[in-house]
Image (tube, rainbow, N blue to C red):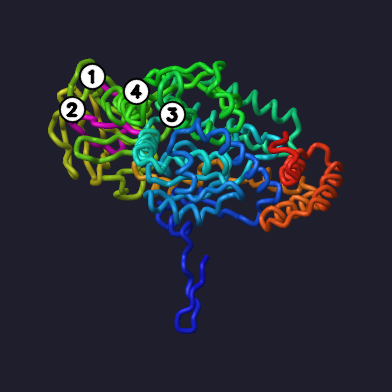
Amino acid sequence: MGIELRSGRESFVPTPTELAIQQLPRNLRRYVVTQDYAAYTPRDQAVWRHIMRRLRDHLADKAHPSYLDGLAATGIGTERIPSLDEMNVKLAALGWSAVAVRGFIPPAVFTEFQALGVLAIAADIRDHEHIDYTPAPDIVHESAGHAPILANARYAEYLRRAGHAGFRAIASIEDEAVFRAIRNLSILEEDPTAVPHRVELAKEQLSAAKASRRYVSENAKASRLYWWTAEYGLIGSGERPHIYGAGLLSSIGEAEQCLSSGVEKIPLSIRCIDTDYDITHMQPQLFVARDFDHLFEVLSAFEASLAYTRGGDFGLEQALAARTVNHLVLSDGLELTGRVVERVSAGWPIAPPQLGTALARLQGPVLTSRGGRALSRPITDDVLVCFGPGQPVPDEGPFDVEFSSGLRVTGFATGGGAVVNLGAHLAGRPLELPRSTHLFTSHGLPSVAGGPADPETWDRWFGDLDALVQGGGEARARAEKARALDGELAALYEEVRRMREKRTKSRDRLKAILERASHWPGDWLLRSEIEELLGSSRHAA
């Protein structure tokens, strides 16, 4: 936090990153952590420098032309880990900002950040033993991978729109299990104290979570589209494509392998959502976009397939299968957030778009909203929605209403959608429904979208129910990495770094440090730093 003196008093001036955080909705702020820059060890800085030097050399003629210019345009240099404050000064000119998060965050949270034009950057950095590739999100991947191509306005627009599509895609309960398994594995693989048995068990957990999927959800398809474009996309001609995906731009191993003949190059199409990926291994095939406009063509086709766009019976079926919190948008704009647990079919179309559902039931709690803004406290009991043309149910008093679906409901309305003494018949057949509940009506169902319509209010009421404790595992792994770095070894890293920065290297002292470094035979990175300064080697691994 900056301090400014005014009339003899201290006045706190928020930093660029603090300003970016202040503009976030409350439900996203709880995932944000402080970039504790002083906590990066001298070896962390050496990891960053080693990766960036190799990537810049390798990608000079292989990355999309926006990449190298974009590094400078987004405040990312080669010599040291970027400061988010410095990045935010640069990103503001592009209409974006960046905040620090701890490792993996839920997909819906990541895509909401992105839809708002905010890069969620993992604050940690990979271990030197995983320098070529790590499945864990880190500051190399999130900043050096995602940020530079934002300098291309067309691509930046694609990222926002892809974030919006992913945010509205419906996720299943199995998707949530897969996310937790991936997060657990990534933490263990970056923890130097993790025993091999625990890592193998985490891999088995991930395989089991993937195998438990009953179907490929919209969220899984959105993840695949994002993976094969924004993360691992190639662009240009099939013979000589360029790299633009962040996973390729930030991974030495992937960047060196991806353009080889050993990796299959497939023309990008909507069919990429049928191809799964394994986050723990380098990819055996990649998809090639013609240009950035091509990304929008594929994204438009994907958006047209979503329940968010299609609504109707399709949307209800997706929400019912998912068993997760989603929201319905009714014909008058009212939004109902909850879990769809029942759909009663009329047996024939009763209203567009492609709606043949007479009645749907949402399990409480249910939040009502309009335009993404909550109207009242959540409804604790179940909510029923009657579909199709028919007389409106009064706000108060007795009612006997029949819809075009053949559904007839009777009862007494007590205000705000609450009803008592409810009775219902469909084509003369009685339905077993709660006698006391909340009842809403709608001519059609324009949209069914993933997650709550008002995430901020839903999080305020129910966010503590999320068993995921953000940042705990990643923070422990980071602390263990810092403790695992011997104090004398850290001091040698720092001394070599100071020599480079001040350009006052002493060959005799460097040779002495190199000799001392032999006491840590597994630490190749320090030797690489010294040998570079001595001029005996460019890279060593």
Identify residue type, mark 3: Thr
Q: Which mark is residue 346?
A: 1
Spatial separation of the CA atoms under disc 2 and disc 3: 40 Å
Q: Is residue 150 magenta?
A: no
Tag in front: 4 or 3: 3
Q: For numbered disc 4, what is the local secondary structure?
A: helix
Residue 470 can be seen in this image: no
The residue closer to the viewer here, 385 or 109, is 109
**Residue occupying image coordinates x 47% and y 36%:** 107
User: In this picture, which residue range is highlighted in magenta?
Assistant: 430-449
Q: Which mark is residue 229?
A: 3
**Residue occupying image coordinates x 51% and y 71%:** 3
Position of residue 491 measured from the top left corner of the image (x, y, whole percent): 78, 54
Q: For numbered disc 2, what is the local secondary structure?
A: loop
Query: Mark 1 and mark 2 in contact (Cβ < 8 Å)?
Result: yes
Task: Quadrant for residue 210, please give it.
Answer: top right
